[in-house]
Image (cartoon, rainbow, N blue to C red):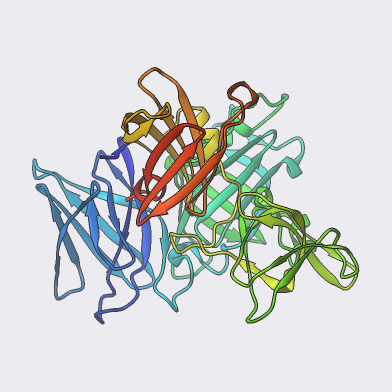
Amino acid sequence: MINPDRTCFAIAAALAASTAGAAAPIFAAKCPNGPSVGADARGRVYVDGKLASTIARPDGQVTARSAGLYVDITPRGSQPPRVTFTARDKSVAECEVVSFRAPDGAGPAGSAAIGKLASTRWRLVEFQSMDNAIGTLRPHDPSQYLMRLNADGTVTMQLNCNRATGNWKAEPAADGASGRFEFGPLATTRALCPAPSMDERIAADSRYVRGYLLKDGRLHLSLMADAGIYAWEPDPAASTAASVPAAPDDGGPRNWEVIGTSGTVNLREQPSTAARIVARLKPGAILDNLGGCQRAGDGIWCDAQTLGGGPRGFVSAESLKPAISPDGSARTGPDDSALRAGQGKFDATGPLPCAQYAGQPMGECTFGVARAGGGYATVVVTHPDGHKRAIYFRMGRPIGADTSQADGYPEFRATRERDLHLIRIGNERYEIPDAVVLGG
């Protein structure tokens, strides 16, 4: 069984309130000391990995029951559903929704996709403290403090020499220019930036942001208890590159899907129709977005390669669209799963079948998984003798492992049987279910 951390993320589907069979919106919620809750594309609800029985109520609410736990899911149309759970001791807690995908026709990210905030890029102006001893703090170089509020409910930040990724959500007030705003937990690198730097302050304060105000072209994010306000202005670099898709590190999509109805699309050595063709790609092929896109000649060309490896080259942006990941979102921003796995910051731990040597029967290893959403994950497996192996997933697919010259760069192979990934790394064997990679 997968054991979630004390603060867990529940991924569930809420049924539409009025019509049966409507598309199920997917959300992620933080449940303090609660169970892991999930629902698949067919609307089946799971509690701590076990299929739960469900009761659909006349008002549209769905109650899931498993092992003495009750989870209530209350849909709210295009707004994130309310999710609460009742523990065995009858205590009730509310899960905090940190990202949300609305039903078809309601936008890709529900309340996160607020027109005035979604897909916007900001540069820090100043921090206005209510403590006179602190006063107003301004970054020494505003271009080193950038924030991207992506339409899928994720946020990426450049904080001087560090980077942070996480989730955001907002609930607008009636005027549309203000409302409630919160960040989910941010995964932040820990480099020591040259002084003076505001990276640690911003990362620490993010958990206390509770409101937003759009005024005079600036975004003001206020901290709880009147502790201060962060003022951001539109990043001037964003407007010049708005029509050119960026690399993931700059908030662009992680993957592309080749579009077209017939024939193949050319992957070229250089961004030009005159350049040598290095590969021919079929419609539906998934590519890694390596270096973003650029203007060249009369078109826009994107630096890419086939998912997980292969020849690298340029594809016309007209032949690409952001790829939809297994969780139904078009993921943007960098993959920080390997970083967090190296820091031991796992989203879940548990046992899985493994074997280390040729001819050895399958035994049991322990694993820790750090997930970056969209089927991006790093799974670290520990054998009984302490030997560790990291296995990397993109778009829900195993694409490689941390092999090295010291162990002879063993061959990596992966096949699939239903929801199980059968992975071989030289003589090592692993069986990793989808639930480890995707959660739920």
At a point 59% along the width and 32% down the height, the residue shown is 189
Residue 173, quarter of the rendered image: bottom left
In percent of width and height, residue 347 lies at 39, 38
| Residue 348 appears left or right of 149 | left
At a point 29% along the width and 74% down the height, the residue shown is 16
Q: Nearer the viewer, residue 415 or 65?
A: 415
Looking at the image, residue 241 lies above or below residue 343: below
Identify the image quadrant of the N terminus. top left
The reply to whether residue 130 is in sight is: no
Looking at the image, residue 388 lies above or below residue 277: above
The reply to whether residue 417 is in sight is: yes
In percent of width and height, residue 423 lies at 45, 42
In percent of width and height, residue 417 lies at 37, 54
Q: Nearer the viewer, residue 35 or 207?
A: 35
Looking at the image, residue 286 lies above or below residue 19: above
Q: Nearer the viewer, residue 215 or 264?
A: 264
Residue 174, quarter of the rendered image: bottom left
At a point 50% along the width and 40% down the height, the residue shown is 186
At a point 57% along the width and 67% down the height, the residue shown is 116
